[in-house]
Image (cartoon, rainbow, N blue to C red):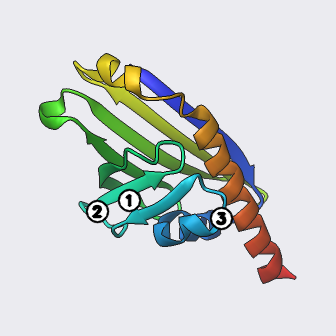
């Protein structure tokens, strides 16, 4: 199995971070590393993501878990589970009102190693996403409070 992960602490509530995270149509408006997302975030719905890192290869996923202000999970890959790609966005509420965001993607299945040969290191892209969401959320939070 191959995994990628990025974690950041955000000075905004889980509800504020969740609102930005699930508004995939606006990801292109901040430094998310994503050109655009087609589809709507809802359980069982299909999304197509156009990442700036791999513009020539958009990927489609199905939303498999939604726990508002806590977690969102997507699943994609090859048919029959030959290669499974599972991405999880986890939000952990902090005692001071902030949020720790973790973005993790796991690749598994018989052909995951083959798929891995054509998949670049996603850690920099995940760090960019986390930093962009942090900047956006903290900017929104300060405008709301101030």
Q: Residue at x 63, y 70 (%)?
A: 16
Q: Quadrant of residue 2?
A: top left
State how far apart marks 2 and 1 are (Cα): 6 Å
Query: The residue tagged with tag 3: helix, strand or loop?
Result: loop
Q: Single out the residue that lies furthest toward the front.
A: 56
Residue contact at pointers 1 and 3, CB within 8 angstroms: no
Give the class, few, some or many, for how many residues have Cα within 10 Å of label 3's Cα (few <14, many ≥20).
Answer: some
Residue 8 x, y percent position in the rendering: 70, 45
Report which residue position mark 3 lands on: 30
- Residue 12 visible in rendering: no
Residue 94 on image: x %, y %? 71, 53
Mark 1 highlights which residue? 66
Q: Is residue 110 visible?
A: yes
What residue does disc 2 label?
43
Identify the element where label 1 is drawn.
strand
Q: Are dots 2 and 1 in contact, CB under 8 Å? A: yes
Crowd band around label 2 with a 10 angstrom C-alpha radius: few (<14), some (14–19), many (20+): some
Q: Label 2's element?
A: loop
Query: Dot 1: few (<14), some (14–19), or many (≥20) neighbours within 10 Å?
Result: some
Name the mark nearer the viewer: 1 or 3: 3
């Amino acid at each position: 199995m191959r995994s990628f992960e990025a974690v950041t602490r955000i000075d905004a509530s889980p509800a504020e971070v969740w609102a930005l995270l699930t508004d995939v149509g606006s990801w292109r408006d901040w430094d998310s590393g994503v050109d655009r997302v087609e589809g709507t975030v809802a359980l069982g719905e299909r999304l197509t993501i156009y990442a700036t890192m791999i513009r020539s290869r958009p990927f489609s996923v199905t939303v498999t878990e939604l726990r508002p202000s806590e977690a969102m999970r997507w699943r994609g890959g090859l048919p029959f589970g030959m290669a499974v790609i599972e991405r999880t966005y986890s939000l952990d509420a902090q005692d001071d009102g902030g949020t720790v965001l973790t973005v993790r993607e796991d690749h598994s299945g018989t052909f995951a190693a083959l798929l891995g040969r054509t998949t670049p290191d996603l850690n920099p892209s995940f760090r960019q996403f986390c930093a962009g969401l942090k900047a956006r959320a903290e900017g929104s939070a300060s405008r709301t409070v101030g």
